[in-house]
Image: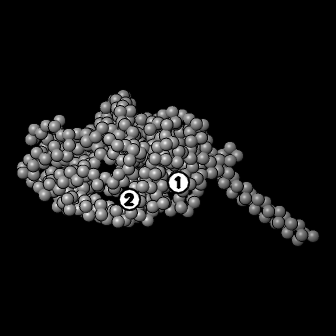
Amino acid sequence: MKKKLVVLLALVLSIGTILSACSSKDSSSAEKDGKNGQPYEIKWYTIGTPQKDTDKVFAEVNKYVKKKINATVKMTQIDWGDWAQKSQVMINSGEPFDIIFTNGTDYVQNAQKGAFLPIDDMLNKEGKDLKNVIDPALLEGIKVNGKVYGVPTNKEAARQSVYTFNKRLVDKYHFDLSKVKSLEDLEPMLKVIKEKEPKITPLATFKAYLPYDYIFNNEMPFAVAFNGDRDHVVNQFESDLAMSTYKTMHSYYKAGYLKEDAATSKESWPMDVENWFVRMGDSQPYADLLWSRSAKYDVVSVPVEKPVTINDSVSGSIQAISATSKNPKKTMEFLTLLNTDPYLRNLVDKGIEGVHYKKDKAGKIEDLPARIDNYNMPTYSLGNHFILYLYKNDPKDKWEKFKDFNESATAAPTLGFHFNSDPVRSELAAITNISKEFYPALATGSVDPEVYLPKLNKKLKDAGADKVLKEIQKQFDKWKSTQK
């Protein structure tokens, strides 16, 4: 009898232990899923080198977020070089997570295949405050098949290409930059630099600018003109403008204004190395101040074009909600808080006040060594810029100028149009390889365009460029018919 009681007692205790363990496991699961009133754990994957102080900063983030919306955040950074492959593997495998950084073509393709959730309804509910602060052009520009699949970073929505000059050399030779209106206007200055500054490369390697709105990118032929006929897709390489521009670049190349290996060089021309006279890039308000601060010497820029809002400029930084998220509404609550709450936005971006940065009486900040060494985050990838603290040498009207810049921009013809390449996938693969073969040499002036542009266009036609052009035009016309 005693043995039976002992066995029975052991059995009861064993069952109790199992039930307790199950209860503990269920409780832990419920906590992560945000059930039973427990805080929901938001899994966030973003780009950038993992930082030493991320856990320290997010301990503070979670105190705040838990109090505000009953959630916590687990942020994981994937390093720049690993991002493309690892992030896509996560998406393709169906791994459960909530937020992922995305941009450009990756954003469009993953939205089209259902990897991201459309957030239009949530923007009118959980994200109402967020929708009120984001530039409408950003939301319009990232629509895929009429729906929004992520939260774009509220920053410059426009692009403006500029020629940027080493100001020391501009001042030394008394160059008048007000006369620079075109690529050809650079020639007299380039000649002087070539003759008198042997250690300076007159033209840092850049690809010649053409005023087109590209369906894919500037290496590919398919484009719509910014000015003139904005209704028809053309092959940019067949235009008189391409021929004349590349002829100018070829004359510069022959004159020695570019390096001999310009077409193949991997040289990134960092700003802090003073070995160049003029370069080309995309600007934003007060960009020269930022670049000068980075370079440790002054630079000055001249616009090549008026500000224009294109697909690439609005889709450069997006936080998408994964289709595998277990609590999309709570995730949208967090993204709304991140983009509307100055304390949280700066905590995630700059770290902890007094540890990673200090603030003066005017509210401007200065990085401390701990931020530079242990919490140096890529600001552009994290959310709304317009509520970030200003640095000590930032102009007071910095964010107002950004808003003015966005408002001054014109919309590109294809803003919001995203081509579905499935019907011409094989042709596009061949055309991409051909374009990559020819474009760098033509755009840097390394070859004679009168010889190589006809060769390029013949190869493109043989690869099916006309078929692709027809398909793009068909989809473009259909998309335009749906626009207000």
Figure check: 347 above or below 446: above
Give the x, y percent position of residue 46: 47, 52
Say above or below: 402 vs 266.
above
Q: Which one is nearer the viewer's eye here, 161 or 363?
A: 161
Query: Which residue is rendered at x = 34% and y = 29% of the image?
Result: 397
Q: Residue furthest left?
A: 196
Q: CA distance from mark 2 to mark 1?
A: 25 Å
Instruction: Report whether 182 appears left or right of 58.
Output: left
**Residue ID at (53%, 61%):** 92
Q: Which mark is residue 112?
A: 1
Which disc, if any, is residue 244? none
Q: Amino acid at mark 1?
A: Gln
Q: Quadrant of residue 124?
A: top right
Q: Which mark is residue 466?
A: 2
Looking at the rendered image, the disc whose residue lies closer to the viewer, 2 or 1, is 2
The answer to whether residue 399 shows anywhere in this view is: no
What residue appears at the point 58 percent right and 56 percent down from the top-left corner?
96
> Dividing the picture into quarters, in which one does residue 227 lie?
top left
User: Which residue is at the front of the view, 400 or 462?
Assistant: 462
Type of the residue with mark 2: Asp
Residue shown at the point (57%, 59%) measured from the top left: 95
Indicate whether 411 appears above or below 428.
above
Dot 1: what SS? helix
Please tell me whether mark 2 sits on a helix, a strand or a loop. helix
Mark with earlier residue (2, 1)? 1
Left or right: 190, with 286 as reference point? left
